[in-house]
Each structure stands twice: as structure tokens, then as C-alpha cells.
Amino acid sequence: MTRRVPRRRALAVIAALLGLLAGLLALPPLASGQEQRIEVQLTEFSITPNSITVTAGVPVTFVVSNTGGAQHNLEFELEAQGLEQVLFDTNLQPGQTREATITFDTPGQWVMYCPVGNHRALGMEGTVIVQAAATPTPTTAPAATPTPAATPTAAATPAPAMTPTPAATPTAAPARTPTPTPMPQVAPPTGGATGSGPADLLIAGLLALGLAGVVAGLAARRRTA
């Protein structure tokens, strides 16, 4: 037997899928550093979707399909700063699909349009909102709880050391200075009654010695004779 799925349950499943798809389309631009991929359709004379939001500095890959009957292309322009970026070097032929990756470095509201002929004036125009990249909030590491320092134990106060009494330094007795012995002074000979001086005494001595020698010589001769 074949069981039929109740119509209400099938509708509930379809509604859930549609809700999931809508949620995916409503997601914000990817964070900095992650590539974003966007599908774009070009036809006469519109761009679908006609409003795109991206993040500055994040590579964006555009998958562009020409679903119309004429040639089309896609160009981005930031009029405030005179910036222009053509997505493809050559136009897309009808039924052709290409993809290209570009990075919007300058935040602002860019204009995207088809630069072929007067397609822009006919309505092939949209906007690209480039948001500034969010600055990551630095994570502050919890401060380390300092370990209380151990209370130092009071050291016992040492008993004061006894200072030895310095021994009395013996006082050296002053050296006795010897008393100089007075030299006897020789009194000059006092002259006799004759008044002869030292020279006279010397002459007299010599004469006496000579006389004694003569006497001795005479005595010797007599002995030999």
C-alpha cells in the first residue's frame, strides 16, 4: 500500500525550506579575510540583484550570467573618488556565464552598471555598498592573582658581644743620656826661672843622646884595644 503524505505536512516542509533560504539571503557580509561569492544576472535592461553589500578588504567573486539577448558587461564606479573597475575585459555574449574576483578596498556606496551602449540609461544600474571592516575587539587575558609573599619570621636578636678591654700599653722609660766625661785639660807647661820653652827641652834631649852615644863608642874602643 502506498501512503500519501498529507498536504499540510508537505506545505509545512516547503515553508520551512523557504524560510531557511530567506535567512541565508539575509545574512550579513562575511567577516574580513573570508571570500564572498555573489551570483548576478544581466538582462534587458536590469541587474539582479540590484543592491549588494560587501566588506572592504574581503575578496568578492562575482558569478555573472547574461540571460538576455544582447551583449552585456558589469562595471563598478565610486563617483566620489573617481574609481572605476570593469569586471570583464570583453562583453558577455547571450547565454554566457563568467566569474571574476575583485576586492573593494575603499568603503562607500559604489554604482554597478552595464557599460555597453546606453544600457545604463535604460535601467541596467544598481548599487554596491562597501562597509568598513569591523575592528576585532582585543581579548584581555585575566590578570594573574599575585601569590601573597610569606611573612618573614623575626630572627632572634643576638646578644651583644663583649668588647675586650684594651691592655695598657707599657710606657717606655726614657733612655738615659750618658753624661759626657770631661776630658782633662793639659795645662801648658809653666816656664821655669830660666824661661826655656819646649824647643829648648828638645835640643837638650838631643844633646844628651848624642853625648851618651859618644861615651858608649869610646868605651867600646877601649875594650877592643
Image (spheres, rainbow, N blue to C red):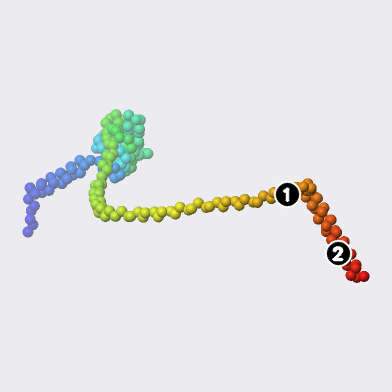
Circle 1 packing at 10 Å, graded few (<14), some (14-19), many (20+), is few
Quadrant, the C terminus: bottom right
Q: Which mark is residue 216?
A: 2
Q: Which mark is residue 166?
A: none
Q: Earlier in the sequence, mark 2 or mark 1?
A: 1
Q: Secondary structure at mark 2?
A: helix
Residue 67 placed where, x, y %?
Answer: 27, 40
Residue 72 placed where, x, y %?
Answer: 32, 36
Q: Which residue is mark 1?
A: 189
Q: CA distance from mark 2 to mark 1?
A: 33 Å
Direction from residue 178 to residue 28 in the image, left or right: left
Residue 68 placed where, x, y %?
Answer: 28, 38
Q: Is residue 61 visible?
A: no
Direction from residue 201 to residue 119 in the image, left or right: left
Q: Amino acid at mark 1?
A: Pro
Q: Residue at x 67, y 49 (%)?
A: 185
Q: Secondary structure at mark 1?
A: loop
Question: In front: 166, or 26?
Answer: 166
Circle 2 packing at 10 Å, graded few (<14), some (14-19), many (20+), is few
Question: In front: 158, or 15?
Answer: 158
Q: How many marks?
A: 2
Q: Residue at x 7, y 50 (%)?
A: 6
